[in-house]
Amino acid sequence: MKTKKLSALALSIIMAAGTFTACSGSNDSGSDSNAGGNDNAGNGDAVQSTEAVDADSLKGKTITLYTHGGNRVLGEEKKDENGNTYRDESYAYLKHLAEKFEEEYGIHVDLQVNSTEDDIRPLLQTQDPSIDIYTSPNWTIEEWQTYAEPYCTLDEAKELYGDYAATMYNDGTYVYALMPAKTYDNAVVYNEETIKLAGYDSIPTTQAEFERLCENLREMGIDPIAMHRIENWPMATINDFANYVAGANDAYPGMLKSDTPFSENEPMGKTIRMYTDWKSRGFFESDIYTDFGVAMDSVGNGKAAMMLFGAWVVPQIQGRVPEGVDPNVIKFAPAPDFGNGQYVMAAAADSYAISKGSDDKEAARLFIEYISEDAQYLADSGYIAMKKGVEPIVPDLYKIIDDAVEAGTCKILFRYATDNNYMNNEEILTEAALREDYKYAGNLFDSIDVTKEPDWAAYDAQVEKQNAAYVEARDYLGYSWE
Amino acid sequence: MTNETKLYKVIRYLFLIGACIFVIIPLVPLIFMAFKTGAEYSSTSVLEPPKNFLNTYNFKYAIRVGNLGKAFLNTAIILTISLIIQVTLTCMVAYVLHRFDFMFKKVVKIMFTLTMFIPVVATQNLIFRMMYAVGLVNTMWSVILLYSGVGIVGIYIMLNQLDGISKEIDEAAYIDGAGYFYTFARIIFPLMKPACTTMIIINGIGLYNDFYIPNLYLNRDVQTFTVALYKFFGSMATPFEIVAAAIIIGMIPIIIVFIFLQKYIYNGLAGSVKM
């Protein structure tokens, strides 16, 4: 009997242990804990050209690159003559580049597409050697420090990239992701044929004229601006437009300077008010776009005229124009003058980082350098090569902005990597429950109901509420402008 | 039939029709979407029927580009192995808990119950590292191992079934010289078939639809259906007409299983509620 009891107990305990691994569904991507620790003892290797590496010793290796830029691996999403979706592989620039690299160096690059950075986070946390290179947007510097091998020192990067080096992800000492090209960020993406219908050949340079264009379009039944408000992330573009309103590159961290950052007398408040005013006047989409792809389609097919986004959407919309229409009708121009001149944000683009767990860091570095020296690949991707000694090829989509910069009518504002003011402002907004989903802009934008007579008293009340919450959080955290 | 009875009948039918509409409405746009072209999808309302219900382009594209055939095979392998292990282990645990008295029996029962209150996500960071340490990440064995664990709901279903199997059967077997394992394997286990079927169906559907575990552990070459489906989602734009077609393809095995096993599902669910 004793044997029976013991064997029963043993069996039950084994089963109980098994149950701890039993599971059910949830699509949370897991925790953010730091498996690898924050080891900054990087190798600090200098940025080197592909010629400086002993490539022969790396022949036969395979490196893996994870990227969120699926269109450069799988091809651009397009519609065939029947309207069906397909991938045009001629646009798979990164895939073609990797094949060329393999031919030249004998190193195979396995390209993997991830939808978000969360897809690769568990592998980075365990320092899985199956990731060598990854691209990732919108990470904090702490995350870069945790998961990425320091690529080089900031000083070394400055030698080869000049001032742009400071816009790469860095902590003041090391650069964590090489960003070998520059891009112009949020401005006006537009369908030239559509605005011509409203009597304009180009995007007006003044706010008043820009708004007249929007009114003309609206009266014609065309959505002036496709914003895709159903998702939250498009609200982030307001930060850049606030810079244009301010004529400076610090409107977002600069909220720290004021007790009333959401009031109309401050750049952020003024910009959100301007967006909301445009909304109340019917300048944004009249319908709900179920997906950002549909929003881009609407500009491609002329249902909407413009988008206020970065250059990265231009090739994607060009791929969506109807069959027989010249894709070059989709153009990119500076935002109008909001009172302080015309500006465009310029930032380092296309981040490539080496994973701390990579077994083939040398081969990974060689490929990243190879990318940085291929001006055509960077131009095809919509960027301008920045490395010294590399002749840049300026993509056609930048022509209007380049001409305006050249003529001195539009000035460039650099977007620098995050600093203390930026981080402190983020923390204050988090504390005030305004950061998540860009509520600091979204709450105000959504306070006006376009189906009714605009109630600006409700908007003003929300401004007061947010100002108070911001100041309370700022004082609680003890931050001020540094 | 009295007026009152008629009124109740009308109300009953209205309620059921309303419930059906509530369930069916979300499926209608999905079916419409699957037959629309990409251009049609972006230019028409979701409730507008497609121009051509014979447009199978999205289905073919989803199968080819999403490699759904391989994904279905992986899913089938994972489900088959893990459900066999899970059901066998659950039956064994339930049998022991039901038939035998032993030290700490209550503690063991409490341990099983406690696991209900531990969120899966909370333990995954640690489990992922353990799986990684033993080299199971990116192999289907990691998912099989996780799916094979015994759950308290399964144990309750089995315990309920065992309530209906007389202990005299066990005792008769012992008198005839059968050991514990023989009695369990040859006599009790076959009698637990209805509960096993219920568990296979309930857990099978749950595991088939699970996204979190396969996405976490099988991020690269070995993909289940749900992970393959997710690969259609872009960081910004997603071809939803293709996704809709893929979802419909994914519903087919579940519908087939339901049609053939619905008798067991209803019976099993009704029986498992009784504690």
Image (cartoon, rainbow, N blue to C red):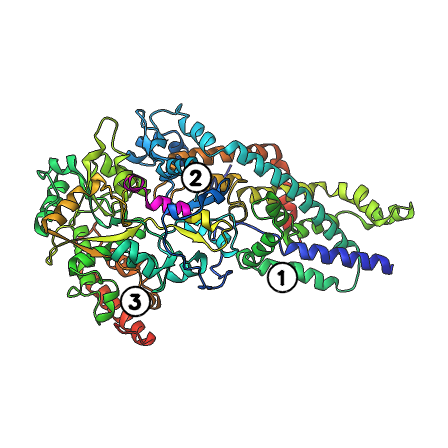
Residue A181, given in percent of the width and then of the height, sits at 29, 48
Residue A383, given in percent of the width and then of the height, sits at 27, 45
Residue B3 seen anywhere in this rendered image of the structure: no
Q: Is residue B65 above or below residue A39?
A: above
Residue under pointer 1: B114
Residue under pointer 3: A425
* Mark number, residue A105: 2
Taken as a whole, is the magenta stretch helix, strand or loop?
Answer: helix
Q: Secondary structure at mark 1?
A: helix
How far apart are labels 2 and 3 at the CA level? Answer: 46 Å
The verdict on residue A115 being magenta is no
Labels 2 and 3: the sequence-earlier one: 2
B82 displayed left or right of B15 = right
Q: Which residues are magenta?
A: A366-379
Q: Secondary structure at mark 3?
A: helix
Residue A439 seen anywhere in this rendered image of the structure: yes
Q: Residues within 10 Å of mark 2 (few under 14, many from 20)?
A: some
How far apart are labels 2 and 1 at the CA level? Answer: 56 Å
Q: Is residue B159 above or below residue A329?
A: below
A25 displayed left or right of A425 = right
Residue at image location 31% in from the left, 72% down from the top: A473
Residue B80, given in percent of the width and then of the height, sits at 64, 39
